[in-house]
Amino acid sequence: MGMFKKILIANRGEIAMRIIRTCREMGIKTVAVYSTADRESLHVRFADEAVCIGPAASKDSYLKMSNIISAAEITNADAIHPGYGFLSENSKFSKICGDHGIKFIGASPEQIDRMGDKATAKLTMKEAGVPCVPGSDGLLESLEHALKTAKEIGFPVMMKATAGGGGKGMRAIWSADELPKAWDSARQEAAAAFGNDGMYMEKLIEEPRHIEIQVVGDQYGKACHLSERDCSIQRRHQKLIEETPSPFMTPELRLAMGDAAVKAAEYIGYEGAGTVEFLVDKHRNFYFMEMNTRIQVEHPITEQVIDYDLIREQIKVAAGVAISGRNYEPELHAIECRINAEDPYNGFRPAPGKILVFHAPGGHGVRLDTHVYAGYSIPSHYDSMIAKLITTARTRQEAIDKMKRALDEFVIEGVKTTIPFHRQLMDHPDFVAGNYTTKFMESFELK
Ligand code: MV4
């Protein structure tokens, strides 16, 4: 296939900047697409060419497959990188790219569908010998079947939407009398959110950690892993901060989880960068949760600790280059704070507006992935993340100290941001001790 000459980036914001940067380093031409609300956005300026693909609303622009394909045709792009979100896990889009002879830098339509259906993904993982949470064999056919399954598993159980992810249509059930109501409300929510009310059930893992393994698979059936990211600190299923290595990891657990993730990827013949998400309980038992067939927001911390360019690897794998196959263990420690234009003192509600003053932190071990600048107006149409602040150091404590210093240096005026929240989090004794689970935010008090 040979290397691509021109890649269209079907995304915006910091991830579009991230992809354009690596393309430039590889001598690959870039095409940016933008909505009318993003005319002044940085990714438009950094790309070699730019095509307006529609009005502000995502459904009319960044999700409008026909306009994106047209932009690729008229600019003669030979590949499309979808980034994360938007069409990055849309199997129809992956297929349409293929039909047009444009390489989709992501997973095949079949793999997107197979991993996108959570009950099918679980059955596939079970076949592959990957540890899964004990639970139903596939979908729950009826309330009676749900009750019977719950009694077999033993309460408490977790009922989940097969088309879900991110917690929508998910219900923790502590006793049989709660089930009928949960059954109805969860299916209604799933039908409304995904157009699919299929449900499955698992043993509830109490106070789990969310530890995910980065994998890369090539076109020749080989996969490797790039170790873990601890993403347990979330608010309403939105990740706030991520780190690697996980403070909860041990060498034995990393070996076992890494092997399981590689086994999963090789079993399905996975091509591209992917993430196998696990739930880890307090006894360090780990269980497959979901597999994401895209690059993730938090990929930079992995890049930092093993000195690796994941976007470059994605492009090379898509162009048919074989991976070396070696696995990577973290040599350093990296933490990422997601800086959102939200008001942490008012329920983290979005706070769009114009950035009047922007002073970026810097210095050794500080990386800032952002698309914003002084004078930029944050549009209200898209998600509220405006920057990712990443610090890297030899030890976790040094990475925390560096993050505190960088957050203190970081000046953004004109819009409210979550900088104060992150700064306080860096002083939280449980965080500093690395002693946190997915329940952490339930007891966090912002001062
Ligand atoms: C679970 C669980 C406990 N037990 N499954 C949240 C969304 C989706 N990724 C699956 N999730 C969970 N599944 C069982 N059997 C707890 C969660 C969960 C969670 C998982 C990871 C990160 C944050 C979370 C927040 C709440 C619940």
Image: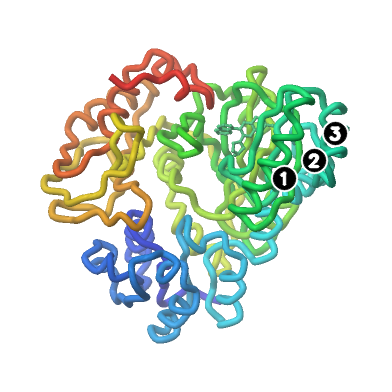
Q: Is residue 112 left or right of residue 14?
A: right
The local crowd at label 2, few if under 14, some if 14 to 19, many if 20 or more residues have their Cα within 10 Å, is: few
Residue 129 locus on image (x, y percent): 80, 40
Contact check, label 3 and label 2, Cβ < 8 Å:
no
Task: Looking at the image, tell me whether mark 3 or mark 2 is earlier in sequence order.
Answer: 2
300 or 149, which is in the foreground? 149
Which residue: 46% across, 74% down? 4
Vertically, is 14 above or below 388?
below
Three-letter residue code for mark 1: Lys
Contact check, label 1 and label 2, Cβ < 8 Å:
yes
Where disc 2 sits, the SS reads loop
Which residue: 62% across, 66% down? 91
Q: Is residue 139 left or right of residue 30?
A: right
Closer to the camera: disc 1 or disc 2?
A: 2
Q: Which residue is mark 1?
A: 263
Does the beta carbon at disc 3 come under 8 Å from ligand 1? Answer: no
Residue 112 locus on image (x, y percent): 64, 59
Task: Looking at the image, tell me whether mark 3 or mark 1 is earlier in sequence order.
Answer: 3
User: Could you give the CA–CA distance between mark 3 and mark 2, rounded to whole angstroms?
Assistant: 22 Å
Q: Which residue is mark 3?
A: 149
Vertically, is 245 above or below 2?
above
Q: Which residue is mark 2?
A: 129
430 or 19, which is in the foreground? 430
Closer to the camera: disc 3 or disc 2?
A: 3
Please identify the quadrant where the C terminus is shown: top left
Please identify the quadrant where the N terminus is shown: bottom right
User: Could you give the CA–CA distance between mark 3 and mark 1, rounded to whole angstroms?
Assistant: 28 Å
Where disc 3 sits, the SS reads helix
